Image: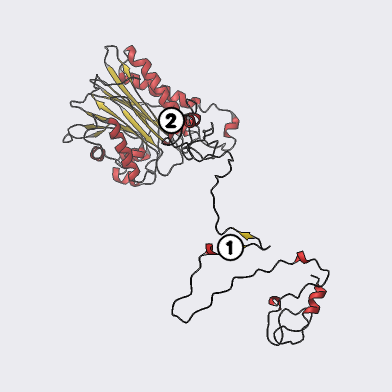
Amino acid sequence: MSQTHKAAAMSVCPSCEEPLEEADRFCGACGYDLSAAPRPSAPAGADAAAEPASVEWPAAPDLDSSDLPAPVHLPTDLQGTDSGGTEIPAAVRFDDPPADDGFRIAAPDPRTATPEQLGAATPPAGTKLCVACRSGHVDPDGYCENCGHAQPRERDHMEQELGAVAAVSDRGLRHHRNEDFFTISSAALPDGSAAVVAVVCDGVSSATRPDDASLAASRAATEALHEALPRGTHPQQAMHESIVAAAEAVNALADEPETAREHKPHQNSPACTFVASVVTKELLIVGWIGDSRAYWVPDDREAPAARLTEDDSWAAQMVAAGLMSEAEAYADERAHAITGWLGADAYELEPHTASFKPDRPGVVVVCTDGLWNYAESADEMARVLPADAARNPLHSAQVLVGHALDGGGHDNVTVAVLPFPVPQSGAGSA
């Protein structure tokens, strides 16, 4: 409809018949909204299809004289129409399955699927399935090829048990990745008896690639111990050699291409702390660098527990120098600044080792500061450790990690539990 025709048709107000100007949108006399005025009929020769057909609304039922309320109509009682007057369904239905766009939400239900469906949905051996859609394969970058969901990292939570030794490591509640790593194993001594080994390393977060450092140190130390112990090397000397080997492995990570540091050129070389224990039928050996710790907890809880390591940290130096009490030192914000670690940026390497010969059975707890921050003293660690730790080391390690997570889980948490003496019938294998 042209603007000229509209102006001609709206020369007077439809309500009060007051004359109107061409540009008026409201009547100046009565205030009538001219945009709400009915359109005039199309002139002869105009395109009738340009105007939508009017919709005839159903008439309301006549009311009777009774007090009964008018009948109520549901939306499905009347067919609707679209703008062209065509009837549309009273309700939307989805009887037909959605089109197959290649995206599968879940694997077939094993209770109703046919053997053929289950076989088709079974991935090749070694293939990881997405934890979200349960049907997509996980690509090498850790994302589902079906739904794109990022998968949990393998190191976010790790558990391992080898008969007489067990370990658990968890990312914690605040860190975006787990920078701790552990290895547990057993080695045969020259006399045929078994030695149980646990190595725990904590990557230094302020350094580059701390997760690689902890992994390299743990594996190198374990390999060194398995080479030395069967030859008859004294366990304490073997421990010393394993720390040196671990240090060399972490130092080697610093020999990386220049492009590996182009985004953080001033960050420290890869680094980690180290603590390990070797338990035999007679001896208990510990070795460490940094602030990861080892505790001794006897099976008889009436006997005193003990901490077997001394931290390489600012707080420990203050206490050793007599400048602060232990409570004052560890309350300081500098308490956890380490003074010893494995890595190319470390000071002169000074491996710490110690040998003990307990007079009663018990367990050795080897852990990172992510645990002992929530059970710092030996007595606190003994209270948290289950009474049957020697018989159930894996469950005990799980309980200790849970204690740290319940306390806040501010750091990665890793702990290994080794019974002493080694039960010769259940030491496990490397």
Q: Nearer the viewer, mark 1 or mark 2?
A: 1
Question: For the residue labelled by badge 1, is the local secondary structure a helix, a strand or a loop?
Answer: loop
> Position of 150 compared to 187: left or right?
right
Q: Quadrant of residue 189?
A: top left
Question: For the residue labelled by badge 2, is the local secondary structure a helix, a strand or a loop?
Answer: helix
According to the image, what is the colour scheme of the structure?
A: secondary structure
Q: As shown in the figure, which amino acid type bears the numbered disc 2?
A: Ser
Q: Is residue 234 above or below residue 11?
A: above
Residue at 81% of width from left, 75% of height from top? Answer: 5
Q: For mark 2, what is the residue?
A: 214
Q: Position of residue 2 (x, y in %)?
A: 81, 71
Q: Is residue 180 visible?
A: yes
Q: As shown in the figure, which amino acid type bears the numbered disc 1?
A: Gln
Residue at 68% of width from left, 79% of height from top? Answer: 33
The answer to which of 137 and 288 lies nearer the viewer is: 137
Residue at 75% of width from left, 80% of height from top? Answer: 24
Q: Position of residue 299 (x, y in %)?
A: 19, 31
Q: Position of residue 315 (x, y in %)?
A: 35, 41
Checking the image for residue 79, the label placed there is 1
Residue at 31% of width from left, 19% of height from top? Answer: 235
**Badge 1: residue crowd in 10 Å (few <14, some 14–19, many ≥20):** few
